Amino acid sequence: MAKPKIAFPAAALLGGAALLAALGASQAPGKPVVPNDPFFKYQISFFNPGGKIEIERTSVKPSPLTVDAVAGIDANVARAWTISTGSRAIVVALLDDGFFYDHEDLKGNIWTNPGESGPDATGHPKETNGLDDDGNGYADDVHGWDFAFDDPDPDCYVFDGMRKDRIQPYWHSISALGIIGARGNNGIGVAGVNWDVSMMLLKIGAQGIGRGETDAARPHRAALAIRYAADNGARVINWSGFVSDPTREALAELRAAIDYAGRKNVLLVVGAGNSGLDLDQPKNATYPACFDADNILTVAMIDVRGELVRYTAGDRVLGSNYGARNVDIAAPEQSFTTFETNGVSSYALAGGTSNAAPLVSGIAALTLSVDPKLGALELKKILMDTARRLPSLEGKVACGGLVDAYASLRAARDSKKTTLR
């Protein structure tokens, strides 16, 4: 089923000089905050000054890329930091294929389960005593859980889908971690949307799935992970992925878990996908993006010029999925963020809706740091109502706009003040 349309206040869509003036007005007042992280200068999804901008593709070796950007096509994160830089009290869960959580710029913001930390009654560390100390059904789940191998270590290793006889590291998640919560202003690497946050790691990686095969168990693992997140304090779940070819029963289980999370005021942020398809067409439906659940926020990706991303691969035209009923909001695609090279912490330029979604998840968490009492639907409404309208997104995403961190935080702050009167 398609998501119900959400009504937004009427607003004129602007173009040319009027558009630039509106973008400038939405970002004023105040100068952007510039952290001392050395690679912040490449994070144009956070602050885009426009013009020809040279970015390194990776921190490991010289690999310059010049992009021709339109000023203001960013998530307005640097100005949002004038209001808040995050809070460790806000928990964001990530569903992904495994995590390199010892990265130098991430490990300080990884969630630690308080019920599985410190000494137990016998003096042994709860982290490794093999007991379910907090009674949540999972033993030694210090940072989350590995639902693929059913153990407490959500590391980055999965069975290689191309070679089922070996286990390989998988790095899909590491860019999302950095976008949401790389430690900011610490003189290392990059800054996450949240300089301080708690990131819960939930591994749902496919095991031994080759080309043309279906991972029938993935919806079940995802459903378990979503319930775990909701039961253990997460307020936002980022899922930069989907389930393929699920059965009706698997979809029902997954939908029930999402509804359960909604009742606990958890917002699920998902990437729209990179196939260049209209998700409003039933034949193109993908899940969970196309569930009609109010607590799902589906994210399209735009380029540095404010257009939906499009590219060719052979004879195929790919890019951001879209759909005014099933896709809610857009975010910049390219982010210079955390990576790993040969087991060592590094940084690289990443793209795709897998990176647009965590930008929105990070902004959702940053908004909650201003007003933690916001419900999932209130949070979603703020993010969509405050999005900056772009002509290119009219009829393509429900709110017709680009996520705006500064506007979202300002709305949350003002709403909180009104509530307290």
Image: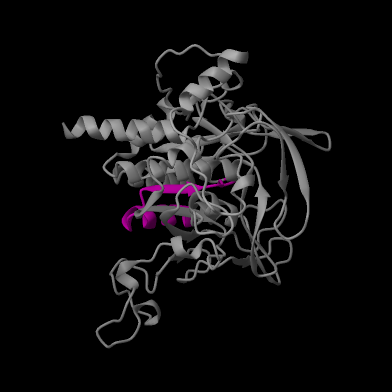
Image height of 49 relative to 357, above or below:
above
Q: In this view, does 32 lie above or below 173?
A: above
The residue under the point 33% across, 86% down is 124
Magenta highlight range = 220-245
Q: Residue furthest left?
A: 421
- Quarter in which the C terminus is drawn: top left
User: As drawn, is 260 to the left or to the right of 288?
Assistant: left
Outermost residue to the bottom: 122
Camera-side residue of 134 and 100: 100
Give the left or right position of residue 417, taking residue 77 as reference: left
What colouring does the structure picture have? one colour
Q: How many labels does the image show?
A: 0
Q: Quadrant location of residue 178?
A: bottom right
The residue lying toward the viewer, choosing from 85 and 292, is 85
Estimate the x, y position of residue 129 in percent, counting from the top left: 37, 82
Q: Which of 60 and 318 is in front in this view?
A: 60
Q: Residue at x 47, y 71 (%)?
A: 151
Residue 222 sits inside the magenta stretch: yes
Residue 32 shown left or right of residue 49 in the figure: left
